Image (spheres, helix red, strand yellow):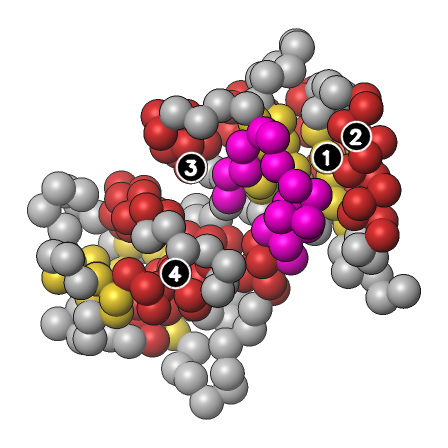
């Protein structure tokens, strides 16, 4: 079977770890499982996984702190896995640097599909004919090196945030609809445009002087977003 990548799962539920191992290995992924955030951080550093599935409610170090600590050392894609369904918890996950959010209970088929979609976003290349560096005043997006800078300062983006910014940059000066962004960045299996709105909000916080009065990413209310004039 084709090796689709290495997945690190951080969850203190050993039964769930066993079930996830079966599901992910059946789908062609290599599985690493640990039961706490500290061991998870060590595994990110040592094993260099392609994606992390991270539970929120854990002893010693919860998922929020673990996500923040992972982001200090790696831009590996992260899917938060939790029983929390409150919108504030989803926003908190994105603020910590997560790329997706799956609530328990979930189907293993759904989670496997999300893993594939997030990995696809992280690995997706841009066609060779497309420009490789986009410059908007003091914002620079280097596609080849996956680097973004504003006013000469580097900006750390998650793979999803970077893909969203690149999609807007490719369509500079044109409004891209919520649905177009959702399909391009998250995939056809995603239908909630709330993903787009939340990520635009976080992206603005990272690249705008005043996120409430954006210079770069402007809103076409009820329709979508535009980067550049």
In the drawing, what numbered circle is on residue 9?
Answer: 1
At horizontal 20% and vertical 58% (from top left) the residue drawn is 217
According to the picture, the residue beneath numbered tag 4 turns out to be 182
Viewer-closest of 123 and 21: 21
Q: In which quarter of the view is residue 83 placed?
A: top right
Query: Can you say whether 45 is above or below 36 in the image?
Result: below
Q: CA distance from mark 4 to mark 2?
A: 30 Å
Q: Residue furthest right?
A: 1
**Residues shaded magenta:** 100-116
Q: Residue at x 58, y 41 (%)?
A: 78
Tag 3 or tag 1, which sits nearer the N-term? 1
Tag in front: 3 or 2: 2
Q: Is residue 55 magenta?
A: no
Q: Which residue is mark 2?
A: 17
Q: Earlier in the sequence, mark 3 or mark 4?
A: 3
Alpha-carbon neighbours of circle 1 within 10 Å: few (<14), some, or many (≥20)? Answer: many
């Amino acid at each position: 079977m084709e090796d689709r990548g290495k997945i690190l799962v951080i969850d203190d539920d050993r039964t769930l770890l066993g079930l996830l191992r079966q599901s992910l290995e059946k789908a062609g992924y290599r599985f690493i499982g640990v039961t706490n955030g500290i061991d998870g951080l060590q595994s990110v550093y040592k094993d260099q996984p392609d994606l992390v599935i991270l539970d929120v409610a854990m002893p010693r170090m919860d998922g929020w702190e673990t996500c923040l600590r992972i982001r200090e050392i790696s831009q590996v894609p992260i899917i938060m896995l939790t029983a929390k369904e409150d919108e504030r918890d989803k926003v908190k996950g994105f603020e910590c640097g997560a790329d997706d959010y799956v609530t328990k209970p979930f189907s293993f088929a759904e989670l496997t599909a999300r893993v594939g979609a997030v990995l696809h976003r992280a690995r997706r290349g841009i066609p060779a004919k497309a420009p490789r560096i986009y410059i908007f005043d003091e914002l620079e997006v280097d596609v080849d090196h996956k680097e973004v800078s504003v006013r000469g300062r580097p900006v750390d983006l998650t793979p999803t945030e970077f893909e969203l910014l690149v999609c807007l940059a490719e369509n500079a000066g044109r409004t891209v609809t919520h649905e177009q962004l959702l399909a391009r960045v998250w995939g056809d299996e995603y239908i909630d445009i709330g993903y787009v709105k939340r990520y635009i909000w976080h992206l603005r916080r990272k690249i705008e002087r005043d996120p409430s009065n954006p210079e770069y990413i402007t809103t076409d209310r009820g329709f979508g977003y535009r980067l550049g004039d």
